[in-house]
Amino acid sequence: MIGSGYGAAVAALRLTEAGVPTLMLEMGQSWSGGASASFCGMRSPDERSTWFAERTRAPLSSFLWMDLANRTIRRHAGVLDRVDFDEMSVYVGRGVGGGSLVNGAMAVTPRRDYLAETLPCVDVPEMYRTHFPRARAELGVNEIDPDWFETCRSYAYARLSRKQAHRAGLATTFVPSVYDFDYLRREEEGSVPRSALAAEVIYGNNHGKRSLDQTYLAAALRTGYLTIRTLHEVREIELEPDGRYTLTAREIDAEGTLLGVRRFGTDRLFLGAGSLGSTELLLRARETGRLPGLSTEVGRGWGGNGNVMLGRANHLWNTTGRLQSAMPALGIDNWDDPEHPVFAEVAPVPVGVETWLSLYLAITRNPERGRFSYDLATDSARLCWSAAQGQPAIDAAKATFDRINRANRTIYRYDLFGGTRPFENRFTYHPLGGVVLDKATDAYGRVRGYRNLYVTDGALIPGSTGVNPFVTITALAERNLERVLAEDVQPA
Ligand code: FAD
């Protein structure tokens, strides 16, 4: 198994429950126990924050045109990586648990009609009957107590955004989470150490969050059949004449020193290295002739879930509060808009002072798709994605937030993303696609052209889920694993 994010964690649990000894190779560190067991907060990031960089690279890069968020740091195997392509940057988690370590914990089930449209080979009623409930239960999804939401200090910013959205005639919805809302309430009462209330987001949470190392992966480890090797980056996949796969991995220490190049053999291989990681591994294998029979579909169908970040400036009397929960709990749901569907999370700005800033991460329905090619010179995947392809996402976000600004006589913030651009769509938190289900694989993630080779992560989803994606990735992996276990794997 390569990687340890959502797709890989589901595969690990279901295989080990069936008694299949499983080795997981993860390029990042383990953050649950040992020397690197604690995360740094967003306000004073150190080397734990960022994957081998000299300076942190926070998504909200400036405030009043000043870079207040970023720090110079030591190069280290930190938890958040930003992979830069020509006109798109992709944020990903690095460590045992993948994106679950760094993400905002928003656990949203997609709309049925949109799931049916994006993944037509999937039995949609079965997904909602079986696989979404299973995924939500294993992930530990919980809902906020609506009464507490109305009175707590830490969601004043969300209540303000809700009022302003309603004034524009837009619907809002509570967003389920894998952050424990009961823990959050106790943080506000002062009876437990703070995490969401201590600006812990994007660089990991020391408390409160049910990341995969506490849920799926912990359960898989309890079976006794899972072994996890950290700081192992898989570079190559080869097929041996006897049908087994050989993996070549670079083992490093947390400072980046190469400890050795290791080889591992397996008769069954699951790729769970995420949209970027799994796509790159298969592209490299195809283009270097190691797995020449891979489909030409490998590398296609990539999208960033139409992500656009934006801020609005509030009037002086509309304060957002000094104490802000770093875990979002509210969304603006304008997905039914026939021209410009948008689902926007009301994002925190947990800097500890009043900013009068309302921040949003909008998910839009951008039909544009990118494509990866393999660059021999750098031995890496290159994303072909142009700024022009991001325009439909900006148009959609603008249509929704122009309405909110008009209704509230407010304006956009122009100081947040460098220059004077009010919308930031040159990065995504939600990379999806590259090895699309029923195209580069069969309808259950079996890679076309090879036996016993599977993709189990966000690479399967063609570019868009319409909501935050990890619940969909988890449920889809549950569905695929159920079939693969029944048909391909002999019980131990
Ligand atoms: P990942 O979780 O990305 O896991 C892939 C793993 O594979 C990583 O640990 C990586 O280090 C490892 N890997 C990669 N290549 C190799 C290799 N060659 N060898 C060994 N290991 C490798 N989604 C939501 O639904 N809700 C949210 O609130 C939310 N907030 C987010 C906030 C941030 C800051 C970010 C970055 C993401 C957020 N997401 C959110 C997105 C979500 O986390 C991802 O969609 C999800 O983690 C993808 O799951 P995955 O299984 O595809 O892969």
Image (spheres, helix red, strand yellow):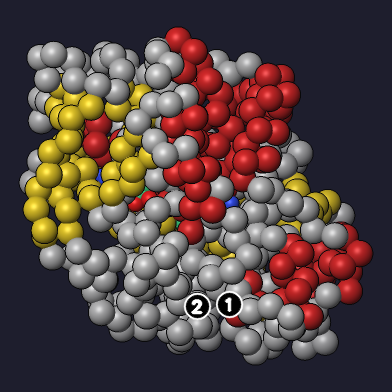
Crowdedness near tag 2: few (<14), some (14–19) or many (≥20) residues, C-alpha within 10 Å = many
Tell me the element at label 2: loop
Residue to which mark 1 is pinned: 199
In this view, the residue in front, 394 or 304, is: 304
Crowdedness near tag 1: few (<14), some (14–19) or many (≥20) residues, C-alpha within 10 Å = many
Which residue is situated farthest in the right direction here? Answer: 147
Tell me the number on the disc at residue 284. Answer: none
Q: Position of residue 424 (x, y in %)?
A: 50, 62
Q: Are marks 2 and 1 in contact (CB under 8 Å)?
A: yes
Residue to which mark 2 is pinned: 41
Q: Is residue 391 above or below residue 207?
A: above
Q: Is 173 positioned to the left or the right of 279 in the image?
A: right
Q: Position of residue 371 (x, y in %)?
A: 33, 36
Q: Position of residue 27 (x, y in %)?
A: 28, 52
Which quadrant is home to the N terminus?
A: top left
Tell me the element at label 1: loop
Q: Position of residue 252 (x, y in %)?
A: 17, 59
For badge 2, the amino acid type reads: Gly
Q: Is 105 positioned to the left or the right of 337 in the image?
A: left
Q: Is residue 227 above or below residue 356?
A: above
For badge 1, the amino acid type reads: Ala
In this view, the residue in front, 93 or 61, is: 93
Residue at coordinates 24% horizontally, 67% vertically from top-left? Answer: 254
- Dot placed on the residue nearer the N-terminal end, 2 or 1: 2
Q: Is residue 185 above or below residue 308?
A: below
Q: Is residue 336 visible?
A: yes
Q: Is 151 positioned to the left or the right of 48 in the image?
A: right
Q: Is residue 389 visible?
A: no
Residue at coordinates 47% horizontally, 24% vertically from top-left? Answer: 18
